[in-house]
Structures are given as C-alpha cells and as structure tokens.
Amino acid sequence: MKFHVPEMNCGHCVAAIEKAVKAADPSATIRTDLAAHATEIDSTVSTAALLQVLAEAGYPAIALGEGSED
C-alpha cells in the first residue's frame, strides 16, 4: 500500500516511521521516497491500522492505493 506522508522530510522521519511500522508488523517491507513524501508498505496489517500507526508516530498519512509489483 502506498501512502502520502506530508510531514516526512528527513532521515529521522523515515527511521521513526520504520520503527512504528515494524512494531506493528516485524515482517513489513518499507520503501520511502523523501522527495515525494511517500512511503510504500508491504504488510499483513490492514490499511486502516497502518494509517493509525503512522498517525500515532506523528506522521498522519493519506492512503494512495496499492503499491507496484516490481
């Protein structure tokens, strides 16, 4: 699932997001694009739960849809 994360703008932000997502799903795969303020998360956790995890970490996000299959 891809997310737009407007408040993500540095390496610390990326690390905080990765830590929060990994706490919810240790097997999650996370790819980020700081320039686009976007992250793609492959997880067994629901989109709604991921949105909550991101918000609780201080990074409210907008779900953009399914990620790429590459």
Image (spheres, rainbow, N blue to C red):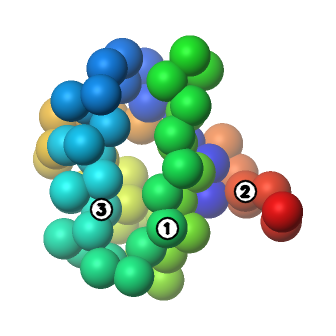
> Few, some or many C-alpha atoms within 10 Å of disc 3 (few <14, some 14-19, many ≥20)?
many
Q: Position of residue 5 (x, y in %)?
A: 44, 30
Answer whether labels 3 and 1 touch (C-beta < 8 Å).
no
Q: Which amino acid is tagged 1?
A: Thr
User: What residue is disc 1 on?
Assistant: 29
Q: Position of residue 39 (x, y in %)?
A: 52, 42
Q: Looking at the image, is 40 positioned above or below residue 5?
A: below
Q: Which amino acid is tagged 2?
A: Gly
> Few, some or many C-alpha atoms within 10 Å of disc 1 (few <14, some 14-19, many ≥20)?
few
User: What residue is disc 2 on?
Assistant: 67
Quarter of the picture holding the C terminus: bottom right
Res. 21 mark? 3
Q: Position of residue 30 (x, y in %)?
A: 48, 57
Q: Residue at x 27, y 68 (%)?
A: 22
Q: Which amino acid is tagged 3?
A: Val
User: Depth check: 48 or 53 in front?
Assistant: 53
Q: Secondary structure at mark 1?
A: strand
Is residue 24 something that shows in the picture? yes
Quarter of the figure with residue 24: bottom left
> Few, some or many C-alpha atoms within 10 Å of disc 2 (few <14, some 14-19, many ≥20)?
few
Q: What is the tally of numbered marks visible in this picture?
A: 3
Q: Nearer the viewer, mark 1 or mark 2?
A: 1
Quarter of the figure with residue 60: top left
